[in-house]
Amino acid sequence: MIKIKTSEEIELMRESALIVSKTLGEIAKEIKPGVTTLQLDKIAEACIRDQGAIPGFLGLYDFPNTLCMSPNSQVVHGIPNGTPLVEGDIISIDCGALKNGFYGDHAYTFAVGEIAPETEKLLQITKESLYVGIREFKANNRVGDVGYAIQKYCEDEGYGVVRELVGHGLGSKMHEDPEMPNYGKRGRGKKFIEGMVVAIEPMINLGTQRIKQHRDGWTITTQDNKPSAHFEHDVALINGKPELLSTFAYIYEALGITSNEENQFRQKELVL
Ligand code: MG
Ligand code: MG
């Protein structure tokens, strides 16, 4: 059952989403060769607690940490550990926070120093596909419209669109209805309703769409061991249109990147 949020609840969800956004911004400052994902995890936990929230993933389905840290061929759900990042890695970082009874859930794939051009392009296209999907989250559209848009955008580049893992409704539970696949058919699936909040999160592979589960019961990797990227925003349906609750602005500030993509998206000027 889809749980519709009031405007007051959506404002609380924005607060939770921004706690995650700020946390990813703090993590962005620390990403460099030599740092371990476990060190970054501790920084994230402190940052979330300093903002009066609690880590959303820690203990959720018994996940052991604050961040899901998935380097290179890991798709999602990687567990932080003591292995240092090295130049040329990519690292997908997924973060959740719970405050006032509502979750934020937001992810970004970072480059560690210089990365291969084909991997750079994978990151760019995956992030673009996130916006391509979000703009279909509007009145009278359906779940399949978002999935179709993301799938087409990424498959046109020859990338593998992961099928087994999907976006989701978000609220007082981390995973609510509806499921939001990154593939689908136009006009199919549940219809979007004013006041819905969803996490849209393309997980896109450079090679095959196929994945495998690690023995730890969590880590998901690509079957061909080629890189995978993951970007996620929390989005509310307000006045028939998608409104971003999370923001990459803190990440861009930390990395010294000038980006107007979110404003352009809001103004419908993002050309993709
Ligand atoms: Mg997430
Ligand atoms: Mg999510």
Image (tube, rainbow, N blue to C red):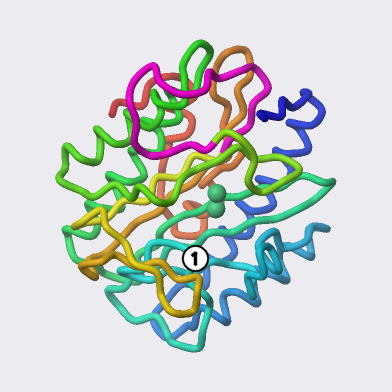
Residue depicted at 79% across the width and 64% down the height? 50
Pointer 1 residue: 77
Quadrant assignment, res 211: bottom left
Residue depicted at 40% across the width and 53% down the height? 230
Residue 243, image x, y percentages: 58, 27
- Write the start and end of the magenta stretch as one range: 179-198
Residue 199, image x, y percentages: 55, 40
User: Relative to 113, does residue 131 appear above or below in the rendering?
Assistant: above
User: Relative to 3, does residue 106 appear above or below in the rendering?
Assistant: below
Residue 271, image x, y percentages: 30, 26
**Main SS of the magenta segment?**
loop
In the foreground, 65 or 166: 166
Task: Find the residue positioned furthest to the bottom.
Answer: 82
Residue 161, image x, y percentages: 29, 47
Q: Is residue 119 left or right of residue 8?
A: left
Quadrant assignment, res 223: bottom left
Q: Is residue 128 left or right of residue 160?
A: right
Magenta stretch contains residue 187:
yes
User: Callout 1 environment at 10 Å: few (<14), some (14 to 19), or many (20+)?
Assistant: many
Residue depicted at 32% across the width and 29% down the height? 148
Magenta stretch contains residue 99:
no
User: Relative to 244, does residue 93 appear above or below in the rendering?
Assistant: below
Q: Quadrant of the N terminus?
A: top right
